[in-house]
Image: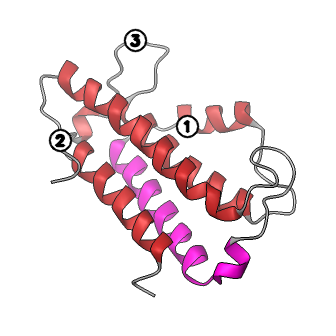
């Protein structure tokens, strides 16, 4: 279903993210402006992780997972931009598979109680786009701090 509106949304989100972060190479993996901040690789890994979090949580009878400490520990383990980008590819493929086979009637059903509980499942797409844009922006700042020029995500 290439014209599925939410698959188009996911494709655009990924394309914008990839363009604006294409300036980074493996050597930039561990760069962070301050030690406590996410590195370049960890930003990308966190984007991947949250895609899975939204997709899996929206369709789970338990809702979206709230073990944020566990999620933080997992992201902090990522040291390679190449590995983080592979995580992102895997997460996007999973998201597209789930969404591509899900009828619109299922996408309109409510998310289980908790975070976003009661909202229709389609509400995750706004959250996904916003979250990914947030990390694109942070990484654009990182690029500038490294004297790199991030590409315009929309061109």
Q: Are marks 3 and 1 in contact (CB under 8 Å)?
A: no
Image quadrant holding the C terminus, namely bottom left
Gap in angstroms between the C-alphas marked 1 and 2: 21 Å
**Residue 100 can be seen in this image:** yes
* Numbered disc in front, either 1 or 2: 2
- Asked if residue 22 is positioned above or below residue 109 in the image, the reply reads above
The residues bearing labels 2 and 3 have C-alpha atoms spaced at a distance of 20 Å
Residue 150 point in image, percent of width and height: 17, 37
Q: Earlier in the sequence, mark 2 or mark 3?
A: 2
Comes first in the chain, label 1 or label 2: 2
* The one of 68 and 106 positioned closer to us in this rendering: 106
Q: Mark 3 packing: few (<14 Cα in 10 Å), some, or many (20+)?
A: few
Residue ID for mark 2? 23
Mark 1–mark 2 contact, CB under 8 Å?
no
Q: Which residues are magenta?
A: 81-107
Tag 3 residue: 34
């Amino acid at each position: 279903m290439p014209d599925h509106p939410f698959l188009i949304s996911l494709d655009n989100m990924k394309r914008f993210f990839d363009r604006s972060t294409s300036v980074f190479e493996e050597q930039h993996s561990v760069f962070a402006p301050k030690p406590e901040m996410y590195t370049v690789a960890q930003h990308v890994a966190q984007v991947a992780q949250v895609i899975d979090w939204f997709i899996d949580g929206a369709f789970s009878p338990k809702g979206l997972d709230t073990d944020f400490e566990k999620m933080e520990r997992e992201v902090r383990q990522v040291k390679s931009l190449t590995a983080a980008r592979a995580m992102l590819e895997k997460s996007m493929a999973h998201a597209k598979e789930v969404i591509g086979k899900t009828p619109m009637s299922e996408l309109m059903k409510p998310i289980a109680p908790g975070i976003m509980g009661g909202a229709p499942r389609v509400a995750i797409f706004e959250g996904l786009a916003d979250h990914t844009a947030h990390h694109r922006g942070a990484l654009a700042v990182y690029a500038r701090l490294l004297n790199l020029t991030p590409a315009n995500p929309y061109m």
